[in-house]
Amino acid sequence: MSSGLPRVAAAAAPATLPPPLPGLEPAWSRLVAVPGADDGPGGTARPARTWHLLDTAGSLAALGAEPVGTLLCVHGNPTWSYLWRSVARHTLDVAAAGGPAWRVVAVDQLDMGFSERTGVRRRLPQRVADLGALTDELGLTGPVVTLGHDWGGVVSLGWAVDHPDLVVAVATCNTAVHQPDDAPIPAPLRLALRPELLGRATVLTPAFLETTLAIAHPKLDRPTADAYRAPYRGAARRGGIGGFVADIPVDASHPSAAELDRIAAGVAALDVPALVMWGPRDPVFLERYLDDLVERLPHADVHRFEGAGHLLPDDADVAGTVLEWLGDRLPDGHAPAADDPRLPSAPAADGPESRAQRPIVGPGARETSPSPGLGSGQRPLWAALDDLRDSDEPALVEMAAAGGPRTISWRLLSRRIDEVAAGLLAVGVRPGDRVSLLVTPGADLTAALYASIRIGATVVVADAGLGLRGLTRAVKGARPDWVIGALPGLGAARALGWPGRRIATVALPAPARRALRVEHTLAAVARLGARRLAGGAALPDAPDPSTPAAVLFTSGSTGPAKGVVYTHRQLGAVRDALAAQYDVGVGTGLVAGFAPFALLGPALGARSVAPDMDVTAPRTLTARAVAASVSAADATVVFLSPAALANVVATASALTATDRRALGRVRLFLSAGAPVSAALLTAATGLMPNATAHTPYGMTEGLLMTDVDLDGVRTAADSSDEGICVGEPAANVRVRIAPLDGEGLPTGSLTDAPGLTGEIVVAAPHVRDHYDRLWRTNRVSRLGVDDPRGHRTGDVGHLDAAGRVWVEGRLQHVLTTPHGVVTPVGPEQRIERVDGVGRAGLAGIGPSGTQQAVAVVETTGGRAARRPALAPPALAAAVRAAAGIPLAAVLVVPVLPTDIRHNSKVDRARLSRWAASVLAGGRMVRP
């Protein structure tokens, strides 16, 4: 053993069967003796060894199920085959239900788990050879899918490289096959590798094991943690743990470095389907290792389980994901041909789904008009900028600029975009690079965005409205190559370790540039580009329409924010849909208090103004600020979020006569991002009396799906339909419903029949391409949808006889009570009509099928609650009478929790957790 490992680490011991452990069927365990041979690494003799492994072959035989193939599962350090118990159980459950029968063989590597303690140091070449000898002894034949975790990922991929005749697919969880030369070994491993600590931390004490168990997310329960500890009780049982750590190739001189390089090169040559699963909260296997794997396996499907960490099979539904993936990629257990469409060309889609969804099928459809495809003749996103490049008319007005409003002409904006584009190419930005934009709406953001898109880079837009934690998850998950940011964004990037080379939008003194790791300023980049263009350099041709143009992040209001990928074709279709629906184009003045519209203003040829407001707090926008913006841009169209619109109405008393005259010129105002009440739209119309009020329905994945005006909202108020009417589908948008079953799941066939409540499914040319590195989420969002442009929205609702769409809530907020399935919006609306009630949120507590409904309300006027409490008896009785459903309790709060970006969507999931806690005797704190 090495000098860092104690002598006790070399102790030998026979293989044994594990004791009874939670989740582990004794029938799966077996001992397999592998005879000795003379074919060890380097021609050395290979002694006989005995392995412990889990094998479901016997259980499948008892079911009468013939295996379609074998899942060869290899654990890492310091776990054992117990890691794969959920995979074994799930494959048997699927087989018992009549699905494909995959045999699971999950090994305990030698010196690990309950396999033999050999007393010999085993390096990476030996471990790969060991696994090959075992599969030979098992007589394993194809098709085989490898599934590895941690260093087991390396070993399993080494086996796959060596057995191309057997392997039909590979899958990994948080593993790495290459250590970059310019990056250090992760800090926890550097510490464990120190000679004075190696033996103490890994063998003499269980510190390394305990640290691994402690970083599970969520925390392991005591019986599960004890099961992982079971084979490693005592220093004599932990030699393999120390040996694994000592075998990490820290540099090219390490004895295992050559084998790691061989495996890395072999992985890059694999042409079988690949699934890369990742837990981002892993302090050891960092995102750079995921990037390296994806670069070597560009065809791989990738799924990041947001919130999960190193022990991914315990932290997330790896078993379900693997089986779904196998069903898609290897439905018959055999690998597709290299040109088979089942072998993807790009990674797709997000974190664990909060509510299961099942396949939906059916031809029923409602379409307002034919949905033509968009061909190569589509005008590029910047076409209007090219058309107007000689115009001195205003293109942008920045209301919050230092020194007062600043106006930028089309001529100046077009030239600036060209200069920045040429400069970005000169400093090293390349087509396909990701460029994260940490800039507030205005000229800098517009120039950086359109310049990046113009040269074929992909912009990453995660707005500050996500909050610092959400923004960190988004930026790290998107892995930008470059960051263009103002000082706050650059400071956060430096402090929180966000990736990407940095370009500042402001001039900084040298010490600040060094501290923030800023390489360039945007002004310097533009000057460099101007010199290149003056010297005869030309910008490249427009990217192919199928090229990714942007990664836009969802609000995170119903879970971790997801990266939504749009191609150039789809962004162009969004522009065209907005232009056609609202007659916005060249000459239109637009006040854009809603980020997507602000970014698309120049693409529409509209004169855009960003009002003076805190973009992270929409409720900071005042009526006077809107009036000033309208005046500055001679605007006729205003687009605000519901929270911003509410504060505009609330601050209307401050308007002057001049302000009111300016607002009187507005012909159209829109509010979207969350439900907008008729009362709020009516109040806003009072401020803009000549404007038509519209509230479009959409999401980050499809910005305009339906539209309704104020008259439509008022008409809907007289209807008996449950929910919020969001109007009729926009042009080229198809809307169908996947009806809910008795368990609240959208299992019904897609239909356009009126009155059936289910998940809202849309299809349009301007729907997003895919979710970023979220294969499973992408799959779920299109499951059973027969249109490649389709999207399952996660919203529940119905169509009425007139073809209007009604939204009744989110799928994960549907309650399954003893009295039936309940969607939340209808009861909330009825409760909000009770005198003294402001907003209401419906929470569900208890297990599915027996959930109890709890109403949580904001009170107004003299009844306004100062702290959370049970509702007064009279109010509770009035709420119960109005709700229309049985209520277990009525609670009052000063303010309902809402999402960060819109400040509008009630966080029902948070309410449910809070209500369950307080009703179980927990502290009555604010939700």
Image: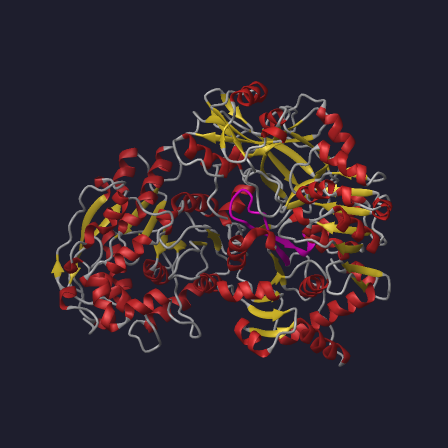
Viewer can see residue 753: yes
**Residue 248 seen in the current view:** no
Asked whether, in this view, residue 643 is left or right of residue 743, the answer is: right
Query: On the rendered structure, is 249 left or right of 673?
Result: left
Determine the residue located farthest toward the bottom in the rendered image: 535
Q: Residue at x 60, y 48 (%)?
A: 901
Residue 215 appears at what percent x and percent y? 35, 54
Q: Quadrant of the N terminus?
A: bottom left
User: For the magenta stretch, what is the residue range?
Assistant: 548-570
Residue at left offset 19%, top offset 71%: 44
Q: Residue 252 appears at what percent x and percent y? A: 35, 77
* Viewer-closest of 905 and 755: 905
- Above or below residue 812? Residue 202 is below
Residue toward you, 131 or 783:
783
Answer left or right for 302 relative to 696.
Answer: left
**Badge count:** 0
Residue 805 screen position, x and y as percent: 67, 31
Magenta residue check for 488:
no
> Is residue 569 located in the magenta-colored stretch of the structure?
yes
State the residue at coordinates (24%, 68%).
198
**Is residue 859 rendered to the left or right of residue 414?**
left
Residue closest to the eye, 848 or 31: 848
Q: Image height check: is 483 above or below 71? A: below
Q: Position of residue 154 (x, y in %)?
A: 35, 62
Q: Nearer the viewer, residue 115 or 461?
A: 461
> Residue 540 occupies which quadrant of the picture?
bottom right
**Protein image colouring:** secondary structure
